[in-house]
Image (cartoon, helix red, strand yellow):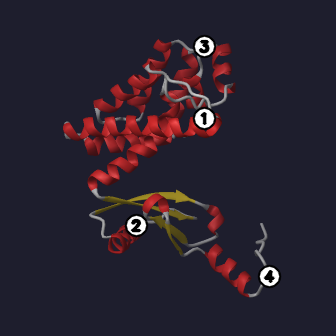
């Protein structure tokens, strides 16, 4: 988070105040391929998925051929955090910002995030030049799926109220490996105060399977049994 703040501070210094305010106020664009077709938002969403999948497969293919798949995957995970900030996406989607300024900010993101693979930095510049940086978050998701398929890796999203220790995460990974038969298990952690206590594990194709060990789930089960509806906890 500190590195992201430093990047955004530098970003501000490179733009006139008026331009930066425009970048902050613009909505995130969801443009995709150069070819435009009619059909409304549903068609646009399908095109976005197609474009993101194509870019993700191309990046994974280059990384695999150059034996940098693991470092590229680590870079993509860092980029997911950087571009989860709408302010960053809005800056790159801003048509009033010169291309060269966007490239300079890409260089700062590469440095501040300590990206390991030069393929990743080259890829980001390609997206900027092609005016496709606005679908980078979709590309991240698609790359994750491609990577998991190539390496026979099962993704397990673990949500908990407090940060779990490494031994606990290792035990969860071991259990998911038994359940799925996957060669590898990658654990992604998310803090979720709404669970009250305990944790949940989501895995399988598109997160189709769920193990719920949260207090919230236990309370909901009790409420259902008593036919009291959802229990409202005092703040």
For the point 42% across and 41% down, which residue is it?
78
Q: Which residue is mark 1?
A: 86
- Front-most of 205 and 210? 205
Q: Earlier in the sequence, mark 1 or mark 2?
A: 1
Residue 15 in view: yes
Picture coordinates of residue 54 (x, y %)?
39, 36
Determine the CA span between mark 4 and mark 3.
56 Å
Q: Which residue is mark 3?
A: 96
Q: Is residue 223 above or below residue 4?
A: below
Q: Which residue is mark 4?
A: 228
Residue 79 in view: no
Q: Are marks 1 and 2 in contact (CB under 8 Å)?
A: no
Q: Earlier in the sequence, mark 4 or mark 3?
A: 3
Picture coordinates of residue 182 (x, y %)?
30, 65
Q: Earlier in the sequence, mark 1 or mark 3?
A: 1
Determine the CA span between mark 2 and mark 3.
45 Å
For the point 62% across and 34% down, which residue is it?
39
For the point 63% across and 80% down, which residue is it?
218
**Front label number (2 vs 3):** 3
- Residue 54 appears left or right of 136: left
Q: Secondary structure at mark 3?
A: loop
Q: Residues within 10 Å of mark 3 (few under 14, many from 20)?
A: few
Determine the CA span between mark 4 and mark 1.
40 Å
Determine the CA span between mark 1 and mark 2.
30 Å
């Amino acid at each position: 988070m500190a590195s992201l703040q430093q990047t955004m501070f530098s970003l501000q210094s490179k733009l006139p105040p008026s331009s930066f305010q425009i970048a902050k106020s613009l909505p995130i664009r969801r443009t995709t391929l150069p070819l435009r077709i009619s059909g409304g938002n549903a068609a646009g969403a399908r095109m976005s998925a197609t474009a993101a999948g194509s870019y993700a497969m191309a990046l994974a293919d280059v990384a695999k051929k150059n034996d940098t798949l693991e470092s590229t995957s680590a870079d993509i995970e860092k980029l997911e955090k950087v571009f989860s900030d709408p302010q960053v996406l809005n800056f790159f989607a801003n048509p009033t910002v010169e291309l060269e300024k966007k490239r300079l900010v890409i260089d700062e993101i590469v440095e501040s995030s300590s990206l390991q693979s030069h393929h990743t930095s080259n890829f980001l510049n390609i997206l900027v030049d092609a005016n496709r940086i606005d679908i980078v978050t979709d590309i991240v998701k698609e790359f994750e799926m491609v990577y998991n398929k190539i390496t026979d890796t099962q993704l397990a999203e673990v949500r908990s109220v407090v940060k779990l220790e490494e031994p606990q995460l290792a035990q969860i990974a071991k259990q998911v490996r038994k359940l799925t038969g996957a060669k590898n298990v990658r654990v992604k952690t998310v803090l979720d105060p709404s669970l009250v206590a305990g944790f949940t594990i989501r895995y399988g194709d598109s997160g189709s399977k769920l193990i719920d060990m949260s207090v919230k789930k236990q309370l909901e089960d009790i409420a259902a049994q008593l036919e009291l509806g959802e229990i409202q906890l005092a703040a």
